[in-house]
């Protein structure tokens, strides 16, 4: 059961984030190590259909997709505003991805985008990244879900996130990851109606409340295969403190095993191919080579129609022809006007 494979760290991260006043307490030594399992039940999502919702991409080739969820519950936002938590943005992760030129997909909650508008805008403007939605405030679509509160209005969770992300990042996400992966087919249908494709993942890094970078990296590297979608976190802080150092190990090990990295949309073939840029050298070459400028016959050979003029001389000839044609038109108009005036005078006299 997939739910059983979800990391204990994620459970604890969510539970602690929801505890009011948890952050305002003095640093607790117990938080320095992974907390014990919490007996929370969690629904499992249905098997992906590979059309409307995906766990992974094609098992061919060598590409995998690294994804990062930027969680932000109302409780996390409170902690940020009160100063109990210095940041819910793991900038080191983004710096490392940029430094290593590793493309990634970032699933932002609407609250996170609203809390970090400049960062959201910068990430969306970077072609290295693809922005997806992680709903508005990380409420559960199906419960039980790691202790998350249930979303009172599922559609609003999606549309409000779209609004917040569009207002800050300037783009409209096309991909959606449900909080805790707690969803069913009706939620997928709702997302589809609202223009979003649901993305889950087949490799959970378990970086939530995991204080061992090698352990996180080992989990990922042991499970990745072509087409894998790896789930990590972007909010950092005490909920995911070792994501960046683990990511460095993952990138190195994955590359050593021959894997490359792709954004989820590219991995799944959801993104339109970028328009081919015309090569200026090719255009110049065509202009210079008569055989490429000449029309092609059915036999495939260029049809010779006498010597071709260089482009500059063609332009001069064309403008001369236009000038002559305009003169002729003027003469005709002038003649017609004079004729008309003569006829009018004749009728008057
Ligand atoms: Zn999440």
Image (cartoon, rainbow, N blue to C red):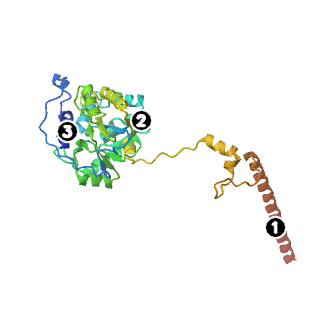
Position in image of residue 52 (x %, y %): 31, 52
Residue 337, label in figure = 1
Position in image of residue 262 (x %, y %): 39, 39
Q: Mark 2 falls on what kind of element?
A: helix
Which picture quadrant has residue 212?
Answer: top left
Q: 243 or 230: nearer the eye?
A: 230
Q: Which mark's residue is nearer the viewer, 3 or 2? A: 3
Residue 135 shows in this picture: no
Q: Residue furthest left?
A: 39
Does mark 2 have its CB less than 8 Å from ligand 1? no
Position in image of residue 25 (x %, y %): 18, 26
Q: Are marks 3 and 1 in contact (CB under 8 Å)?
A: no
Residue 122, label in figure = 2
* Rendered-image quadrant of the N terminus: top left
Q: CA distance from mark 1 to mark 2?
A: 65 Å
Q: Quadrant of ligand 1?
A: top left
Residue 266, label in figure = none
Q: Residue at x 82, y 68 (%)?
A: 336
Q: Residues within 10 Å of mark 2 (few under 14, many from 20)?
A: few
Q: Mark 3 falls on what kind of element?
A: helix
From the viewer's perspective, is residue 148 above or below residue 192?
above
Q: Mark 1 falls on what kind of element?
A: helix
Residue 5, label in figure = 3
Q: Residues within 10 Å of mark 1 (few under 14, many from 20)?
A: few
Q: Which mark's residue is nearer the viewer, 3 or 1? A: 3
């Amino acid at each position: 059961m997939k739910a059983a494979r979800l990391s204990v760290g994620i459970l604890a991260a969510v539970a602690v984030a929801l505890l009011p006043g948890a952050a305002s307490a003095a640093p607790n030594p117990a938080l320095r190590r992974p907390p014990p399992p919490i007996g929370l039940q969690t629904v499992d999502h249905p098997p992906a259909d590979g059309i409307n919702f995906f766990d992974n991409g094609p098992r061919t080739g060598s590409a995998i997709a690294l994804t990062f969820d930027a969680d932000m519950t109302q409780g996390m936002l409170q902690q940020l505003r009160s100063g109990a938590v210095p940041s819910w943005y793991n900038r080191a992760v983004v710096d490392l991805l940029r430094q290593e030129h590793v493309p990634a997909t970032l699933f932002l909650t609407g609250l996170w985008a609203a809390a970090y508008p400049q960062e959201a805008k910068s990430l969306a403007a970077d072609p290295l990244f693809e922005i997806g939605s992680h709903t508005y405030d990380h409420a559960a679509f199906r419960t039980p879900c790691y202790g998350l509160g249930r979303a009172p209005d599922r559609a609003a969770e999606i549309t409000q996130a779209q609004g917040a992300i569009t207002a800050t990042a300037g783009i409209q996400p096309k991909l959606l990851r449900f909080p805790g992966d707690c969803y069913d087919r009706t939620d997928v249908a709702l997302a589809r109606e609202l223009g979003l494709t649901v993305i889950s993942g087949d490799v959970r890094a378990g970086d939530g409340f995991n204080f061992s970078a090698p352990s996180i990296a080992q989990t990922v590297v042991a499970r990745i295969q072509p087409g894998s979608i790896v789930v990590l976190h972007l909010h950092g802080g005490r909920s995911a403190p070792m994501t960046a150092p683990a990511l460095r190990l993952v990138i190195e090990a994955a590359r050593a095993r021959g894997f490359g990295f792709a954004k989820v949309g590219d991995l799944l073939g959801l993104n339109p191919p970028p328009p081919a840029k015309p090569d200026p050298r090719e255009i110049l070459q065509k202009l210079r080579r008569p055989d490429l400028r000449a029309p092609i016959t059915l036999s495939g050979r260029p049809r010779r129609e006498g010597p071709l003029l260089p482009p500059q001389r063609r332009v001069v000839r064309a403008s001369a022809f236009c000038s002559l044609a305009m003169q002729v038109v003027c003469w005709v108009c002038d003649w017609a006007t004079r004729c008309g005036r003569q006829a009018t005078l004749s009728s008057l006299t």
